[in-house]
Image (cartoon, rainbow, N blue to C red):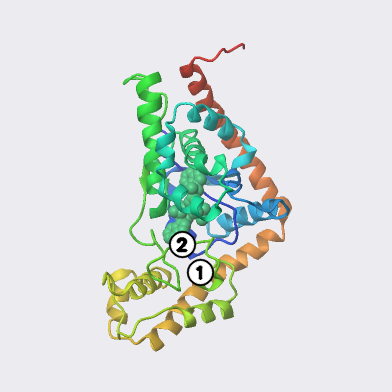
Amino acid sequence: MQRPRVLSGVQPTGALHLGNWLGAIRNWVDLQNSHETYVCVVDLHAITVPHDPARLAEETLSTAALYLACGMDPERCCIFVQSQVSAHSELCWLLNCITPLNWLERMIQFKEKASKQGDNVSVGLLDYPVLMAADILLYDADLVPVGEDQKQHLELARDIAQQRINARFGSEENPVLKVPAPLITKEGARVMSLCDGRSKMSKSDPNDASRITLLDPPELITKKIKRAKTDPQMGLQFDNPERPEADNLLGIYSILSGRGREAAALECADMGWGTFKPLLADATVSALEPIQHRYAQLMDNRDELAKVLREGRDRAEDTAQTTLKRVRQALGFLATN
Ligand code: AMP
Ligand code: TRP
């Protein structure tokens, strides 16, 4: 029997941070053992806001290397670059023509990003969730592991598959597309900024001190944690709405130390910030060290990395073309072979 499918991706825009790792990539690593897993570097999404062409290729490669360094194994999953499988753009167009404009205009992430772009909002930024739906639907994904911020995009992908494609162009017994489900794990689903426990850790925050990237050297990690925002209360705790920083940093500690929520909460219940912060810094440095080590090795051997991506592309292409053909047929396009 075929294993259930998983698809996910991260944009190659700037260094990946703890949020990307704990919210998304960490879950992929487990899933590749039980699921047929596809992970891509979503470089077409990266150009929906102004980008630097001199850095796109390098950041794409570096993001792929980080997937591997975090534990994705090309023997057990398919790793590829989105723009190298043209079916993504093609399905995106087909879905564009059946997706109502107002579904896109109400997307929270579009509104947030558009408000930062002034007069320079591209059609691509509005269309971002349709391309994401194409990414997912092309692989008949059962599950899409993402952070909390992607929930609305996942709902859109489901609505497109169910209401706009299957209901109109398929039948109950013969659906055209698989309707995917999000996988958002409670732990790590929303890692917050080090400077403000109420806003999300993000690649686009202009303040570098707000995030820890997977490639930050140990001294920088320690410095960022030392300066992280705190509150005047003693003792770390979860779920106190008055103390978002305590909740966030204790959450990060509970995962990175491997203790889990209960044991971490118990250990730190009476701890002052001055004792807690070095503990968190040590746990973070130790958790990232093996990733950084492996990353350096991978980036030193670019031929091997390129080979992994070529093989990934070929496998992804096969699966994607099968689905694309089904959709073209359902929509009534002429086939001449
Ligand atoms: P992006 O950096 O926007 O390409 O996001 C890639 C993946 O990381 C998506 O699954 C996001 O949901 C996840 N992610 C991004 N930021 C965070 C965060 N602060 N906490 C948890 N997950 C996140
Ligand atoms: N929009 C996602 C993000 O920024 C990235 C993404 C693009 C994605 N295509 C995807 C995630 C398909 C999961 C599945 O986080």
Q: Quadrant of residue 1?
A: top left
The x, y position of residue 38, in whole percent, is: 51, 43
Q: Check disc 2 and report its element: helix, strand or loop.
A: helix
- The answer to whether residue 205 shows anywhere in this view is yes
The x, y position of residue 173, in whole percent, is: 32, 20
The x, y position of residue 319, in whole percent, is: 53, 31
From the viewer's perspective, is residue 296 above or below residue 228? above
Q: Tell me if mark 2 has few (under 14), some (14-19) or many (20+) residues whose alpha carbon lies within 10 angstroms of its own.
A: many
User: As shown in the figure, which amino acid type bears the numbered disc 2?
Assistant: Gly
Q: Check disc 1 and report its element: helix, strand or loop.
A: loop
From the viewer's perspective, is residue 205 above or below residue 165? below
| Number of marks | 2
Q: Tell me if mark 1 has few (under 14), some (14-19) or many (20+) residues whose alpha carbon lies within 10 angstroms of its own.
A: many
User: As shown in the figure, which amino acid type bears the numbered disc 1?
Assistant: Arg
At 54% from the left edge and 70% from the top edge, which residue is drawn?
207
Q: Are marks 1 and 2 in contact (CB under 8 Å)?
A: yes
Q: Using the image, tell me which numbered label, if any, was put on residue 19.
A: 2
Q: Quadrant of residue 334?
A: top right
- Separation of marks 1 and 2 at Cα, in angstroms: 8 Å
Q: Using the image, tell me which numbered label, if any, was put on residue 211.
A: 1
